Image (tube, rainbow, N blue to C red):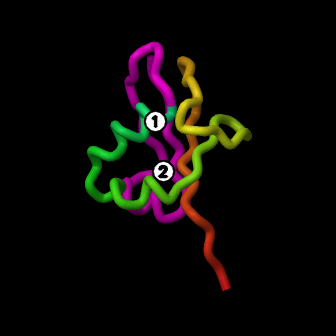
């Protein structure tokens, strides 16, 4: 199956783009997608600090993904 990754904030800079397409097995979870993204050394250290959403819903790493899902990578927010 194919899903779209939407990077936000610092993760978009580290990924080099705001979007990426991933091919996963039919039974893939968010954790499986994260594991594939960890192969990108620039992202690897930031991913454990991020939250993840499918559509408008925050999801846990064990959330099952479906064909065409958009997985958002949400880095911690800081401000001043």
Question: What is the spatial separation of the Cα atoms under label 2 and label 1, in whole angstroms?
Answer: 20 Å
Q: Position of residue 42 (x, y in %)?
A: 30, 59
Quick check: 22 left or right of 66? left
**Which of the labelled discs sits on residue 49, or is there none?**
none
Quick check: 58 left or right of 42? right
**Magenta stretch holds residue 56:** no
Reply above or below: 75 against 24. Answer: below
From the image, state whether disc 2 or disc 1 is nearer to you: 1
State the residue in front, 78 or 23: 78
Residue sitting at 60 percent across and 39 percent down? 60
Within 10 Å of disc 2 (Cα), the crowding (few <14, some 14-19, many 20+) is: some
Determine whether the residue tagged by mark 2 lies in a helix, strand or loop.
loop
Q: Position of residue 27 (x, y in %)?
A: 47, 16
Furthest residue to the top?
26
Q: Position of residue 25 (x, y in %)?
A: 40, 17
**Magenta stretch holds residue 20:** yes
Reply above or below: 75 against 31. Answer: below
Q: How many marks?
A: 2
Q: Look at the image and give the residue range highlighted in magenta.
A: 1-29
Q: Position of residue 49 (x, y in %)?
A: 50, 59
**Which of the labelled discs sits on residue 18, or is there none?**
2
Q: Are the residues tagged 2 and 1 within 8 Å (C-beta)? A: no
Reply above or below: 57 against 75. Answer: above
Within 10 Å of disc 1 (Cα), the crowding (few <14, some 14-19, many 20+) is: some
**Which of the labelled discs sits on residue 31, or is there none?**
1
Residue sitting at 55 percent across and 56 percent down? 8
Determine whether the residue tagged by mark 1 lies in a helix, strand or loop.
helix
Reply above or below: 29 against 52. Answer: above
The answer to which of marks 2 and 1 sits earlier in the sequence is 2
Residue sitting at 55 percent across and 24 percent down? 65
Which quarter shows the N terminus? Answer: top left
């Amino acid at each position: 199956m194919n899903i779209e990754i939407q990077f936000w904030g610092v993760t978009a800079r580290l990924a080099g783009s705001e979007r990426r397409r991933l091919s996963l097995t039919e039974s893939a979870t968010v954790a499986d997608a994260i594991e594939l993204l960890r192969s990108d050394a620039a992202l690897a250290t930031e991913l454990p600090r991020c939250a993840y959403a499918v559509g408008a819903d925050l999801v846990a790493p064990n959330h099952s993904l479906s064909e065409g899902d958009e997985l958002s990578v949400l880095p911690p927010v800081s401000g001043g």
